[in-house]
Amino acid sequence: MCGIVAYVGSRSAQPILLDALNRLEYRGYDSAGLAILNGKGLEVRKKSGRILELAKACEAHPVQGNLGISHTRWATHGAATDQNAHPHLDSSGRLALVHNGVIENYLELKSQLSKTGHRFASETDTEILAHLIGEAFQASKEKGEARLIEAVRNAIARIHGTLGIAVIHADLPGLVVGARRGSPLVIGVGQGENFLASDIQALAPYTNRVVILQDQEIVSLHADRFDIIAPLGAKTNFKVEKIENGVTHSDKGSHPHYMLKEIFEQPSSILNAFRGRLDSDGATAKLGGLNLTSEQLRKIERICVLGCGTALHSGMVGKYLIESLAKIPVETQHASEFRYGDSPVSAHTLFLAVSQSGETADTLGALREAKRRGYTCLGICNNVASTIARESDGGVYMHAGPEIGVAATKSFTSQVTIFALLGLLLGRLRSLSASHGAELLEALTHLPHKIEETLKHSDKVAQVAQKYAATRSMLFLGRLANFPIALEGALKMKEITYIHAEGYPSAELKHGVIALIDKDTPTVLIATQDGVYEKNLGSLQEIKARGGPVIALAHEGDKKIMGLADALLEVPQTHRLLQPILNVIPLQLLSYHMAVALGRDVDKPRNLAKSVTVE
């Protein structure tokens, strides 16, 4: 989840590294640091806290040089302190390393190194790797850059776990060495300069020409060239790709936070999710990236959706959509559990791996396990150059644009929209009538406008947020496809307000949850008019009878519920299968406005990172 950036070229490295780190701060933000070769040796600056603290340190004591590595950290081993911040040095002090990943056998390696006289300045697993590479460098009989490359290869062979690293050595002033195993790493190709980063986003606006480093590959990076070395030591073929939409800079515009900006971008992100994918003549969807024929799609007997957090919730809505439209059984699994479980899978099962970043470690691991078992696996991602997108048999690109806020918003609604398209496609290949398909297509085309109408209620939602901002615990209830919306609403509330919140099916109220109801615990009840509307009103009455305040999410103009609830969140009406997409938006706004009222750091909530690239 950490961010890595390296630069080698003719320009001053410090401002470039700091700017690029700012673009990656959503990946980790408890400390940051950089190391630059200044012509005499290594010069290091690192500070706990946000990148602003590192920038202040660099402003007070600037570092000169044209080659350097940098890092923004999300702590795994060791607290967020200056000492634990990256880069880390070897025992000679002439080698510096930054690392994204987890070294699982670091205690064993640390013990071995300690016995041979190594002393450590931090509590991190990464420092052990710096010492291993330094030791291998000293022992190597190779000359020039081959010496550092061999040292990196020999050291990482002793490592159990994941890594994306960048290494520099004072004896090799024109060289950066990078290596990847499990954690993403991308080369940015410039004119007389080159970059290395854990995320394409860091490279804007420096270049849009990239090479995605593959697992087990090592790169030697110079200002005027780079070489990629395969696991067996031979140079490998690679392709320089031009990323049109990936390397872009995203600013907040007129909005105070990225999260609010991204909530308000949903009319366009939804439009981009279905743009060019609607077939009005066939009353179906066109998803050519699946790389499956109609005959292969018809043979699917089950679907398994793999995801974590918000992506899993979108899959739970997707289950409802696909089962309703295509009558194919769908199960959803926490990606983190599937890889290590023994759940039986039937022969004609299609796996769907859902991840905004396309780099989520647990989801990638589950995808690889499903592929190892011989199943067809598709990805639903927002990053076309991501590992999940590359390792899947096919998939659907979300086209949501950069999502910087840690709390996912527009990526969730884009994912659900894609599930609606997939359900429509599979349904029309089976028994779904053209008239029902056309109804859904018509509703999809009007959805961006409906979202715009929903967003007009933001100020009213803010008033509700002010009223309940002091609460310490909340419940979110919904039924059928709105149950995962309740889960997502509760997750958003937990993530950015730090208020304890739980989501449940409304009917589970009587099976234990009702014990939590009291005057200080608000319940958000999703009660738009559908087949279980009256049932939801019954749940509302049960909560009110026990003194619990109710925030009802209902259709505009619902006078019946208006007289029963303590507060109202309103949404327009749309096709029943698309209603969950509208229903989640007031819940996103509610958590946002409550977080603002509480003075939380909305875009960078404590303990969280945007792209979870470690297990």
Image: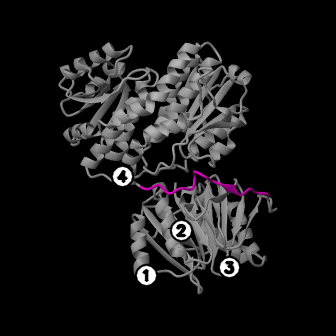
| 1 or 4: mark nearer the eye | 4
Q: Which residue is mark 1?
A: 61
| Label located before the other in sequence (2 or 3) | 2
Neighbor class of circle 2 (other Cα within 10 Å; few <14, some 14-19, many 20+) is many
Q: Is residue 66 visible?
A: yes
Neighbor class of circle 3 (other Cα within 10 Å; few <14, some 14-19, many 20+) is some
Q: Where residue 27 sits in the image (x, y, percent)?
A: 49, 55
Q: Amino acid at mark 3?
A: Leu
Q: Where residue 68 sits in the image (x, y, percent)?
A: 58, 73
SS under mark 4: loop
SS under mark 3: loop
In the image, which residues are magenta? Answer: 237-251
| Label located before the other in sequence (1 or 2) | 1
Separation (CA) of disc 4 from disc 2:
25 Å
Q: Amino acid at mark 4?
A: His
Separation (CA) of disc 3 from disc 1:
24 Å
| Label located before the other in sequence (3 or 4) | 3
Q: Which residue is mark 3?
A: 172
Separation (CA) of disc 2 from disc 3:
17 Å
